Image (cartoon, rainbow, N blue to C red):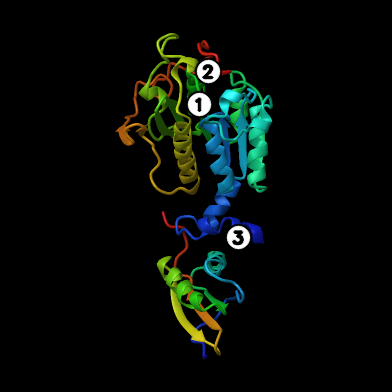
Amino acid sequence: MADEFKIDKTLDIKGQVCPYTFVRSKLAIEKMNLGEVLEIVTDHKPASENVPRSMENEGQKVLKIDQVGEKEWHIFVRKDKEKIKK
Amino acid sequence: MDFTEDQILRYSRHILLPEVGGEGQERLLNAKVVLVGAGGLGSPVGYYLAAAGVGTIGVIDNDRVEISNLQRQIAHNTGRLGVLKADSAKETYETLNPDVKVVTHKERLTSKNIKDIIKDYDIVVDGSDNFPTRYLVNDACVMLKKTLVSAAVFRFEGQVMTIVPGYGPCYRCLFEIPPPPGMVPSCQEAGILGVVTGVIGTIQATEVVKVILGIGQPLKGSLLLWNALDMSFRKVKVPHNRECPVCGEHPTITELIDYEQFCSMSH
């Protein structure tokens, strides 16, 4: 898990299920600055696929998804997009 | 802002939308919208705005709930007969969503009081059922540069137009003066299919939410017409009238007018 990037914020959403995993991730990244990296920690397998996909759909950059043990995923997302879509 | 746990859950389906998000939800919570009338149109408008978390909703209405209202005015109920509609609507909306503050204005709009009542709101929603009020609201919104979502219903039909003063036509660009008393059927004669007010009011609420969020194309410069029997929608382009007596280049109406009331509004 050597990080080639600096993590600016870590969001632990273990125990959360969809769609609140993405809702909370989105709220967190909205508050960050462009170029900053959010680390999302989840123990919900569907979220390890859905959250990155939704983040990409909204114009953010998924840098890496690490599985840690059997039931923990770390998703690293760089904020590439600021404004809400018109 | 930081949302509470309840707010994250309550507004999650908004936050998920790329066009809304937490930022858009925050705009909704900070928005101030005033409803002219808590009747057939105002009821669903307020209902959906309250559900959406529009933080401040003004309700202008001086009438009391009557049993003949309940076929369409969904903010009220049988237990509230005789209660002022503004109070009844406040109870309904604040019960639905405690994030919403409903401000009641229990008076009839006139040229004297309208500017003072609407000046602190961002958007005005006209759900009135008579021409004198419709023209008064239009003129006041043009003068104060308030966005106005105007609508009307009649039997099985309805129409909606969003007026952004300075950026398109106003109601007078479309219909310069009110029809003379007696030319149109009065409220009591005309009848209205209850659900028509629900459809048209819900379209008004949609326009309000879009304007607050700054997304999509509001019905600015176009009049939407809907017929329930044909289930047909029509969108008619409405040009800005440079000769418009209130929003044209040389306005002749510079003071608000109280037109003669020609329809009793209590039934």
- The mark closer to the camera, 2 or 3, is 3
Badge 2 density bin: few <14, some 14–19, many ≥20, Cα 10 Å: some
> Which of the two residues, B158 or B250, is positioned nearer the viewer here?
B158
Say the numbered circle drawn on residue B256: 2
Q: Name the N-terminal-most of marks 3 and 1.
A: 3
Q: Quadrant of the C terminus of chain B?
A: top right
Percent coordinates x, y for residue B208 in the rendering: 49, 41
Helix, strand or loop under label 3? helix
Q: Chain of mark 1?
A: B
Q: CA distance from mark 1 to mark 2?
A: 9 Å
The answer to whether A71 appears left or right of B203 in the picture is right
The structure residue drawn at horizontal position 41% and vertical position 16%, both measured from the top left corner, is B177
Percent coordinates x, y for residue B51 in the rendering: 57, 47
Amino acid type for the residue under numbered disc 1: Met
Q: Name the N-terminal-most of marks 2 and 3.
A: 3
> Which of the two residues, A68 or B139, is positioned nearer the viewer here?
A68
Q: Is residue B146 visible?
A: yes
Q: CA distance from mark 2 to mark 3?
A: 44 Å
Q: Is residue B104 visible?
A: no
Q: Is residue B128 above or below residue B98?
A: above
Helix, strand or loop under label 2? loop
Percent coordinates x, y for residue A58 in the rendering: 43, 65
Amino acid type for the residue under numbered disc 2: Leu
Mark 1 touches mark 2? (CB < 8 Å): yes
| Residue labelled with disc 3 | B8
Q: Chain of mark 2?
A: B
Q: Name the N-terminal-most of marks 1 and 2.
A: 1
| Residue labelled with disc 1 | B143
Q: Chain of mark 3?
A: B
Percent coordinates x, y for residue B213 in the rendering: 49, 49
Helix, strand or loop under label 1? helix
Amino acid type for the residue under numbered disc 3: Ile
